[in-house]
Image: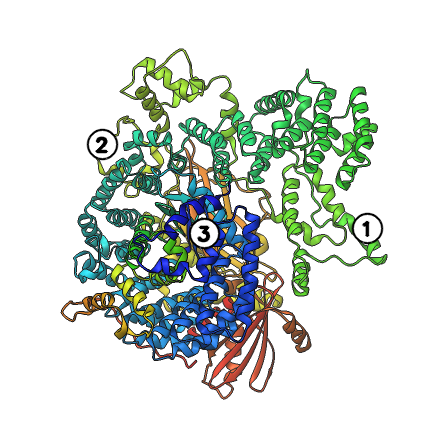
Amino acid sequence: MIKAILIFNNHGKPRLIRFYQYFAEDMQQQIIRETFHLVSKRDDNVCNFLEGGSLIGGSDYKLIYRHYATLYFVFCVDSSESELGILDLIQVFVETLDKCFENVCELDLIFHMDKVHYILQEVVMGGMVLETNMNEIVAQVENKISPSGGLSAAPARAVSAVKNMNLPEIPRNINIGDINIKVPSLSPF
Amino acid sequence: MSDVVEKTLTALPSLLSLDSQPGSAKLSSTSKLGNLIRGITELTSKHEEEKLIQRELTSIKDQVSSPNTSMRQMKELMVRAIYCEMLGYEASFSYIHAIKLAQQGSVLDKRVGYLAVSLFLNESHELLLLLVNTVLKDLQSTNLIEVCMALTVVSQMFPKDMIPAILPLVEDKLNHPKEIIRRKAVLALYKFYLIAPNQVQHIHNKFRKALCDKDPGVMTASLHIYLQLIKENSEGYKDLTASFVTILKQVVGGKLPMDFNYHSVPAPWLQIQLLRILSLLGKNDQSTSEIMYEVLDESLRRAEMNHNITYAILYECVKCIYTIQPKSELLEKAAKCIGNFVLSPKINLKYLGLKALTYVVQQDPKLALQHQMTIIECLDHPDLIIKRETLELLFRITNGQNVTVIVEKMLDFLRISKDDYTTIDLVGKVAELAEKYPFETMNTVFSLGGDMMQPDIPNSFLKLLSEGFDSDEEDRKLRLFAVDSYVSLLQSEPNKLPQRFLQVISWVLGEYSHLSAELEPATVMTLLSKLLDLKHTSSETKSWVLMAMTKLCEGGVAISVAQDIYETHSSSMDTVLRQRAQELQHLSQDSELRGRVLPRDAGLMPLEVDSSLSFLDGFVSEALAAGAAPYKPPHQRQEELAQAKALSLEPYSLSLPISMSSCSIADRQSPTLMSMSSGLSGDSTDLSHKGGSTTLKLDGVKRVWGREGYLAQREPVEETAQVEVPSPLRSPSQQAEADSTQSQTPTPTVTPELEQDKQQLASSLFVGLGSQSSVCLMGKSDPTPQRFRRKAQGRASSSGASEKTPTSLGSTPSPVDNLLCNSLLDSNLVSEPTNQTPQASQSLDTTNGNCHEELTDVKENNPSLIHNNEEPDKPKDLCLSSHLPTELSGLSHSEITPLCSNQSVNLSACHVQKEDSLQLVIFIFNSSDSALQQMQLQVDSGELKVNYCLSLITDSPVEEVRSHSVAVCHYSVTVKRPSVHVEVLGMLSYQLPGGTPQTIQFSHKLPLTTFIRPLTLSTEEYGSMWLAFSQDTKQNLTLINDDQDPLTTTLNVLKKKLQLHVVEIIGVEGIVACQLVQDQPCLMHCRVHAGTLAVWLRSPVPDLPDCLLYHCQRALQEH
């Protein structure tokens, strides 16, 4: 599970903070500071994984980060996440930002903090990876940002993306094999 | 210049310029948020930022509460409040407005509102309750976007108690036509499962439906749930293995639409998830593993090395292959893959390669041998993370022969490391290795580790020193050496030594400095007294020092020193110090008394400890008579305080165990013991109980350490030369060099080539890893299948390496199975005559005897089994239950379950329920032909408190087990933290004569029900307790409807199965009470309502109601 996602710039100023596990406000700030401290002193040619920050907790946790120009994207995860998988998830997230903002830069993240959060919500939900397909993420975000709501009013790009994905010719079904679904005799609740 | 200004300079040009930033950024720069941000960037100090934000917050506050603020403005205000919160300034006034916005606004307003709520609040925030209705409404909305938002916020945080309210709605969403909704619903349910597993128990088959969803996205989401479920209980989901394999096969085979490709790899995250699930399923299960061999092979083949993400898949594949039951072709391929990782120039892959090596090295130490040169290079890698990972790997391959070099490397790393966490971790590891390692290491460890190390490290060190080894002469030399080295340390720079080290030093000097003939007590006294004057010496250390002085003060000079000390410290503010000083004064005057109180060389004599502190009884009763408050055990005090919402007792509960453990190390009175007992007057029985439980961790602190350690002073070269495996590639001169590396005295006269240097390092690091005959230097070792250790388990003992052998029941030789089977039947036979047990424990017996009743049935129906059992050629001593400790033999015990076994030992366990605790008995059966020596069993658990019980027959822990006989270890366990099943982890270390030390690990699960005891209460008592308890849970249970009085029947079932006490049944309501040993009550209120049994549980213990509820459900289901 992803425990927290932190984005801060080269000076340690937070740009986006999302915790999926509860920490008190001052603890959050302390985590940001310590994470920045850990990450910022690492060269660009060392590995992207850090272990054992004492704040988010012990040996089970890892920091996986990427450094883009002026920004650090840091994911704090536990051992049930794949290191390289998360590294690519960060890439997907950043590419999606780039797609939504067209040449994303630090300022976009500052002025459109809310939109960045919406994008993130479509990638990671409650600490779990929800979607990794860029087009799908953009479609979900765009179709909600459009004022009247609903799929019909989505911008052309999103519509095309959605259409592309829902083309009936594309077989989207996987044959799951022989899972035996037992119809439950639910206890009245 | 502050960083804020620096940022201004970088940010402003682009902010103000008219460059190509299309629209968005420029537009907002004129908004209020823009103004705020611009304002912040223009500031010069943190203080000014604070002022500006405070001003901003005040203005936001005014505006949000003004009735004229439009929704649009509100939205903008919220974003600004989010921004301020992100910077760490509290905007709690806006929380309620965020909730309002989510309630009232249009879709877009709602979105901001929900976002703000999910960022501001947490699961236990009281305002969150106000959101429940909104979420309910939105879940029922026809607007998909509102449903999505509601599901998102629910998965981020939702009050646990309110889950039942929205659960049916979320469940409904699993059938929603839109896949995105179904997907989010699955994740929301997963979240519910994580925070309240009992609540979603009934919908497990819906998870199965989600797994079969026609949309792969929904299926992917459901894998999160399955990964978690299988992690908790892999047995229950074995039937799904084939389905997971089918899915993976199709994904790998490219059956998914192109949409799911990422850099032309089909659904990589899905593959990773599936591989993790498969590895959990195939662990220790041959038949399940067999199902997945083919698809694993396919995955390995398909994942060509072309992108980062394929490496991710490969890494999971490799881990999976090494986790499940081994298959040699796959292992070979996986080993090759690991090689590619390790050798990769990409640093991330190297890191993962090292991780993979660390993971597999216990099964396949030769793999490390193949990559030894790379590992050596990694040791000098500039990246600390890589370095640490390498040390971790080396730690795993440590054996008697390379320990010197590895510990030296670790200490090198410790010297440069600044990170607290790393230090703590590494110091622990070094100390663990130090059992095989020379004495000065401990000095280095103490100096470097400083005060961050775990307190049990110095404790076990002192214990080791005082218990001594085989020969008195060696003990004397070792202690003398310690004294000498410490005296010289104190003479040089005592102010640089950490506190813990000073404590160790003063104890050793106090105890053993008399061994040194030329050392005058007065000299030591003077040295020690200098410590007292040091500024940074803590008062705990000071009391250690004073205690040491008390042991030493002898002869004229010493007495005068003591007198001086007494004068300075008798007026100390610290009562403990004052007490010590008093003792020093008195004992220095009266040498006869001192001789009696602190007899010399008494370290080996077992000290009689009056654990009930009965000698204080008179004092206690006097104090009580004088009006003192009766003593309350800490947990009771804490409870009362929690209820009163008063200050937390944190510092006390922290310091208590620490000082306790420090008093149990020193065998003789340590300085803190007295202060403990005097500090906490009153009835201290509970205290002593606690003291007993903080027993030392003495794992493996045995002989190897000292003998070698001390001898290494004189003859390390001989020693290493003996154990060195002859290496064909080295000339005699190189051999000598290598030896010098090992004995840590690098000779500066020889300046070997760098590469040669590394090879020597390699040979010293990896010595003893290969098979008996040859160490292959350059990694081209023979590719015989022998290297797969798990496959050829018989070899393990002869290979000369001391490694942990993971054992599995499935792979044990067949005689063992027979044996266990027999013992199981035997146990059943023996537990038969338990009917004569006194009636007091009758209720316990009914549950204890559960399995035994069933088994006797089997016996009656199936006489052939008995016949089999009574065959004359079966050795009599297989009957394990006859080995039960005498104090338990009268009581009936549970079925004896096998824990683990290898070629020489079988471990099995059973438990006996006593009224105040659960007695866990572990049987160690030596099935080999020779005796096991130096056996140590260590049992540990996060959730349990484990006390070693001395059995009456053997009054010390068993150390040796004769061939084909049984040793018994007996523990008394109580629950510290309830969970549905509490797990006991253990490790047995032993040695066969002439062999190397071996360890075998096991785990044993005990259901919580074994800790539940009836709690006899009156209805009034029940009533008052009910109101006092804070943790509660409500749930509906099925009623057993076969009678005219379903409530009574159901409660009787619960009473019988879970040992609950039914307090009273009035009409359709019943109240029931039970307790978790020891003294952790749980109350249950049941009411028949609409054909179900509505239960409401309350307890002062967190999680107890949830766990108990789970067992109630189980009990009723089984009925």
Which label sits on residue A29?
A: none
- Foreground mark, 3 or 1, reads 3
Q: How far apart are marks 3 and 2 (CA)?
A: 54 Å
Give the x, y percent position of residue B589.
Answer: 83, 28
The label shown at residue B782 is 2
Identify the residue under disc 1: B619
Please give the label number shown on residue A14.
Answer: 3
Q: Residues within 10 Å of mark 2 (few under 14, many from 20)?
A: few
Counting from the top left corner in percent of width and height, residue B157 is at 46, 66
Cβ–Cβ below 8 Å for labels 3 and 1? no
Say what amino acid the circle numbered 3 marks.
Pro
Q: Label 3, secondary structure: give it.
A: strand
Q: Which amino acid does label 1 sit on?
A: Phe
Looking at the image, the residue that sits furthest to the bottom is: B1044
Q: Residues within 10 Å of mark 3 (few under 14, many from 20)?
A: many
- Of the numbered discs 2 and 1, the one sitting upstream in the chain is 1
Q: What residue type is labelled 2?
A: Asp
Q: Distance between the residues labelled 3 and 1?
A: 60 Å
In the rendered image, residue B712, in percent from the top left (x then y), is placed at: 49, 21
The reply to whether discs 2 and 1 touch (Cβ–Cβ < 8 Å) is no
The one of B369 and A104 positioned closer to us in this rendering: A104
Up/down of B553 relative to A94, above or below: above
Residue that appears at 36% across and 74% down: B147
Which residue is situated farthest in the top direction here? B749
Colour mode of the rendering: rainbow
